[in-house]
Image (cartoon, rainbow, N blue to C red):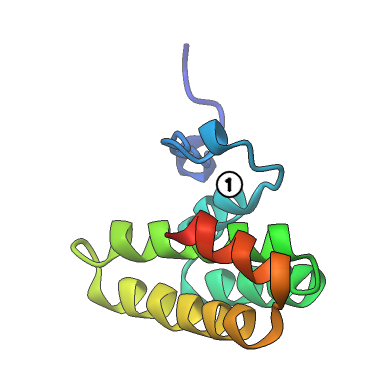
Amino acid sequence: MDDIFGDNVIVVPPEENINERGYETSFYQDFSIADKFGPDSVQDTFDRAFNEWKKNYKYLTELVIVLNHKMWDWAPRNAARGKLYENLWKKAAAYAEQNLKGEELDYYYHETD
């Protein structure tokens, strides 16, 4: 079948083991789509996700995990994109470690271990 969309087709890579852990968000897919549009889109996707979900400890935890996956995925292929994801990961992880308490922090450390 011919590709009717040409170069504008966005193919989201498989989520590897992300869904096997039972996560509920579309963060991985969201960042995969943003990757196709460049660093500004990645930053915008992070800003929106972080601002919307930083008060939900499970979603914040998943965001940190996805950013870590993306950082390691991009680092060998594109140092600048890998560094962007590293900076975003550091921001989200620092926020989680400074703001989560008790069982929420235990959950975060268990899932990110």
Q: Quadrant of residue 83?
A: bottom left
Judge whether 29 appears above or below 102 on screen. Answer: above
Judge whether 77 appears above or below 100 on screen. Answer: above
Q: Nearer the viewer, residue 11 or 45?
A: 45
Residue at x 43%, y 83% (from the top left corner): 87
| Residue with the most extreme left position | 76
Residue 43 percent across, percent down from the top left = 57, 77
Q: Nearer the viewer, residue 67 or 74?
A: 67
| Residue with the most extreme front position | 102
72 vs 27, left or right, is left
Q: Secondary structure at mark 1?
A: helix
Q: Quadrant of residue 22?
A: top right
Residue 77 percent across, percent down from the top left = 21, 61
Residue at x 46%, y 82% (from the top left corner): 90
In this figure, which residue is indicated by the disc labeled 1? Answer: 29
Q: Residues within 10 Å of mark 1 (few under 14, many from 20)?
A: some
Residue 103 percent across, percent down from the top left = 71, 65
**Across the whole image, how many numbered discs are drawn on residues?**
1
Residue 102 percent across, percent down from the top left = 71, 73
Say which amino acid is labelled 1.
Gln
Q: Nearer the viewer, residue 32 or 38?
A: 32
67 vs 92, left or right, is left
Q: Quadrant of residue 14?
A: top left
Name the quadrant of the C terminus. Answer: bottom left
Q: Nearer the viewer, residue 98 or 74?
A: 98
